[in-house]
Amino acid sequence: MQKRKRKSAERMPDKPAKKLTTNPDEAVLNLLSKSKADLSKERRISFYLYFPDRAKAVIAENELKKLGFEVECSQSYDEKNWLCLASNHLMPTYSTLTSLRKKLERIAEKLDGNYDGWETGLDADESEGLPNIKRS
């Protein structure tokens, strides 16, 4: 018996498609969950915002502080932009993070900047140091 060659018009049986998320906050929360992070505890979460010059970064810094963030602004590694790293202790919930995303995107957009997501540690206690799960 001769093996039959597959014609390009033939299809493989459909496999159930995995649900892909397009929401970056949900994607990072899923990654944290798969990594066995305890999402029931507050943790330090750091948010990244970039601005084209120091003056706009300072304005953003003041707005971020009004929202309760600890903020450090410095020239970014590319030496063209300014990074405002805004951190706070928060419960890493979908609703909290998407609400903050909207606020931070508005601040960035208003000042010709860019919101570049957030990161945190796997362990709530580790999130005090350098965050290690990145980024939405």
Image (cartoon, rainbow, N blue to C red):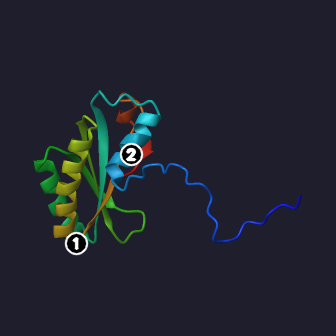
Where is residue 123 shown, x and y percent of the image?
Answer: 40, 30
**Residue 59 seen by the camera:** yes
Mark 2–mark 1 Cα distance, whole angstroms, equals 26 Å
Total marks shown come to 2
Residue 133 circle label: none
Tag 2 residue: 28
Compared to residue 76, the image places residue 87 above or below, namely above
Q: Residues within 10 Å of mark 2 (few under 14, many from 20)?
A: many
> What's the amino acid at mark 2?
Val
Q: Secondary structure at mark 1?
A: loop
Compared to residue 1, the image places residue 90 above or below, namely above
**Residue 130 seen by the camera:** no
Compared to residue 68, the image places residue 81 above or below, namely below
**Residue at 38% in and 52% down:** 21
Q: Secondary structure at mark 2?
A: helix
Q: Quadrant of residue 36?
A: top left
Compared to residue 85, the image places residue 80 above or below, namely below
Task: Please state which of the two labelled residues, at mark 2 or mark 1, is closer to the viewer.
Answer: 2
In this orientation, which residue lies closer to the viewer: 99 or 50?
99
Tag 1 residue: 112
Where is residue 76 shown, x and y percent of the image?
Answer: 37, 62
**Residue at 17% in and 62% down:** 106
Where is residue 77 shown, x and y percent of the image?
Answer: 42, 63
Q: Is residue 123 left or right of residue 6?
A: left
Q: Quadrant of residue 80?
A: bottom left
In this orientation, which residue lies closer to the viewer: 135 or 36?
36
> What's the amino acid at mark 1?
Asp
- Pointers 2 and 1 in contact (C-beta within 8 Å): no
